[in-house]
Image (tube, helix red, strand yellow):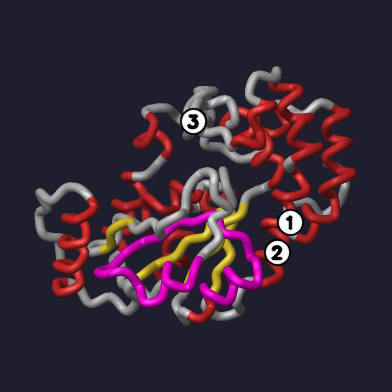
Amino acid sequence: MSPPVSILKGKPFRRIQREIYQRVYNHPHRNLLAVGQPKSGSTWLFRMMKMIPGYLPYAPPGISIESRHNLEPNHLTPPPAGYTVTKTHSRATPENLRIIHETNRPYVVLIRDPRDLLVSWAHYVTISGRTLVRWEAARDLPIEQRIDFYIENVLPDTLNWALDWHREIHPSIGLLIRYEDMLADTPAIMRRVFDHYQVNIAEDKLAAIVEANTFQKTTGRKPGEAQANAFNRKGIAGDWVNFFSDDQTAAFKLVAADALAKLGYAQSEAW
């Protein structure tokens, strides 16, 4: 069924729209939660999820670029009106886990190779309005020094984000996916995601959702064609090899070698 044509704009009208969709559709879960590591492709995943007929975006109050995306009990329970999709960067803290698991609804967690996260961050941090206050010191550094800054100041926290979710994700209602797998076979991974959410999506609709959200459709550029100051910069995996010096590779290994192995990104240190 195609969603009703909407001419409603703004948050008050969006709520009305959600309430209308709640009467039109009959999905098994009112809210679909996607938890993504920052710069892991979570916006890409979120855009595809928003194209499920009847679902509309919902951001819990207080979730912002400067927050830690810590959840509160009323953020997810009861679910907001209508059928909604929520994206956060929430950590796997005991309180966040309790709030998410008490909903008893399926959720997805997205991670990415920490080496590529570094390179993405090193470009992203220069975008005006996108830099966390605590990282402002890195904004005007040359790219080589931004990489050094990340390894020293940001990398341990990034690794813990992924390792905590890797360890704590719920065995049945949680699904851990990787950006690299989503990039390599988007239809297959999105089929897993939609099936996990128990959403009935026909193959032609799935193909249309994937096609509408390709890197080229979103940016007008082919994957690999970089625009340094763009939110969607390059759209590929493995770009870290183009930026790491030998010394930076060695420094990264000292901090992250064990984590890369646990997350399935390196079976040995021969990289």
- Label 2: element kind: helix
Residue 160 disc label: 1
Front position in the image: 54 or 180: 54
Q: Along the polypeptide, which appears first: circle 3 or circle 2? A: 3
Q: What residue is shown with label 2?
A: 164
Q: Is-magenta flag for residue 78?
A: yes
Q: Quadrant of the C terminus?
A: top right
Q: Which residue is mark 3?
A: 129
Apparent side of residue 102 relative to residue 203 in the rendered image (left or right): right
Mark 2 and mark 1: span between their CA atoms? 6 Å
Magenta residue span: 72-100
Q: Earlier in the sequence, mark 3 or mark 1?
A: 3
In-image side of 221 versus 224 (left or right):
left
What numbered label is drawn on residue 135? none
Residue 176: image x %, image y %? Answer: 58, 65
Alpha-carbon span between mark 3 and mark 1: 25 Å
Instruction: Give the answer, above or below, for where 138 lies relative to 261.
Output: above
Residue 177: image x %, image y %? 57, 60
Mark-to-mark CA distance, 3 and 2: 28 Å
Q: Are marks 2 and 1 in contact (CB under 8 Å)?
A: yes
